[in-house]
Amino acid sequence: MSVQTWLRHARRSLLATGTTAVLTLALLVGTEATSQAASQRPCDLYASGGTPCVAAHSTTRALYGAYEGSLYQVRRASDSATKNIGVLSAGGYADAAAQDGFCAGTTCVITVIYDQSGRGNSLTQAPAGGAAPGPDNLAPATAAPITVAGHRAYGVYVAAGTGYRNNRTNGIATGDQPEGMYAVLDGTHFGGGCCFDYGNAETNSLDTGNGHMEAIYFGDSTIWGSGTGSGPWVMADLENGLFSGPNAGYNANDPSVSHRFLTAIVKGAPNLWAIKAANAQSGGLSTYYSGARPNVQGYNPMHKEGAIILGIGGDNSKSSSGTFYEGVMTSGYPTDATENAVQANITAAGYQAPPLASSALTPGARVSLKATTTCCNADYLRHQADGTVAISPITAASANADKSDATWIVRPGLADSACLSFESAGAPGQYLRHAGFQLRTASSDATALFNRDATFCLRAGHSGQGYSFQSVNYPNRFIRHYAYTGYLAGDGVGGNTWDSDALWSEDTSWLTAQPWS
Ligand code: AHR
């Protein structure tokens, strides 16, 4: 007997047998409803709301309860072979073990992020555009590890220079047609350049004028718009402008948001648009703006073209950074109720930062940190007698003083015990810190500033190798070597020569090695 037939029978008996059975049926119906709800994914919710997904991208999970195809494709460096990475079960989570097996002993990049909507709107390596040459870089496949519902998965780590695009799409809004979009991002990974975006852009990779884009922007650029605090902000990239609210420039209702997992929403319809955001791990959405189009020529009506971008601006501006886990674009302007249901589905998915267990980096351990860039992969992070920090080759034949200056004692982070500090083995009591964005060693003066400058949070290596060390007080800057010297560097942003985006991922990735002393 089918569940439906059984329920019909049960309902008939209930009428005859009274309230105890009513309660029993309520429980059974409730159980069925719960299990249906459990298998719903964001695109099922958008479809129920009458605004179906026309593009659905994720490297972490299925975005339809019934989706059992590939999520993304990786290519390995050793032989250029590719492999599609699917889900563990229909509607389920990424099969990260398949990637790990395929990429073992080599490195992989993400070559395709498949469209789950069935419209073929997959994302591949972005071509050259008006603002920058191409093709853009591809994301290292292991640089953004996370867990989702306890399953290991990988996000799309966009360093400056990385970008994905589809200029020949199907079903994406054009002109002034209504659309919605959300993305789940790493709110601690951002840049100030133009433009880490996900959404609707030009089909020729050129800046074709105001209103030709409608995309989620995340970062701390203040070139066109900003909100309260120092950023990062969720804004709408509408072409030739990042809008944080009704006015060009500053809007007081757009707050800085940096949840480790961030839900960002932008949607637009004729003379109507909105920005919303939320913590993707708990709680509901906040609306930062909902109202009329900007009072600037070209944005009402809109002139959307319907290409899809990830990690770049409409004209392939690629000097910003961020991390993407999942996102969709819809046909039609989703209701708030639908978006609330989607946010509940995202929080229920259980995104978590990964345990980056490494016995080499356990407080109390001694460790040496080896550079990974090809120029310098026999070099170690070390300080000099005058406290400046550099990289240099260390071998068994090196002087003992050099060996100890290239050895660090791992300490709980002075400003945050969930992060790390590094005490010099060669100069006990002296800690690795930044000052003026240059690395040096110095004795603690016990100030809050010293503690923050000397605290670094462990992240997966940006190049896909080893670890990267994020400053606790400048979260978009990391320990880097540049011209053989140690710095705290942003990815193409910061204004110093050592913030160059060239080789940034490699220069900020370090291997742990046996301590030299
Ligand atoms: O709107 C901001 C940026 O301006 C767009 O992303 C880019 O196409 C242009 O440079």
Image (cartoon, rainbow, N blue to C red):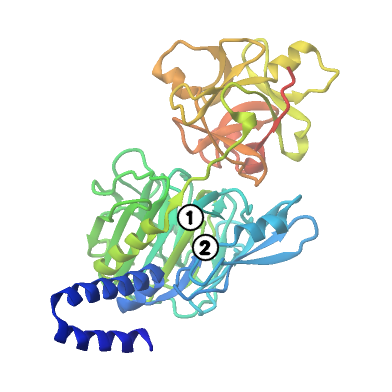
Q: Above or below — where is 77 with respect to 293?
A: above
Instruction: Give me the C-alpha separation between circle 2 and circle 1.
Output: 7 Å
Q: Residue at x 35, y 60 (%)?
A: 265
Crowdedness of circle 1 by 10 Å Cα count: few (<14), some, many (20+)?
some
Q: Amino acid at mark 1?
A: Val
Q: Residue 300: x and y, percent?
A: 29, 69
Residue 134 seen in the figure: no
Q: Quadrant of ligand 1?
A: bottom left
Mark positioned earlier in the residue sequence (2 or 1) = 2
Cβ atoms under marks 2 and 1 closer than 8 Å: yes
Query: Quick one: quadrant of the C terminus?
Result: top right
Q: What residue sits 73% from the left and 52% below the top?
A: 104
The quarter of the displayed image where residue 46 is located: bottom left
Which mark, residue 148?
Answer: 1
Which residue is farthest right? 397
Give the percent coordinates (x, y) of residue 379: 75, 28
Q: What residue lies at 47% left-to-right and 72% top-to-bottom?
A: 55
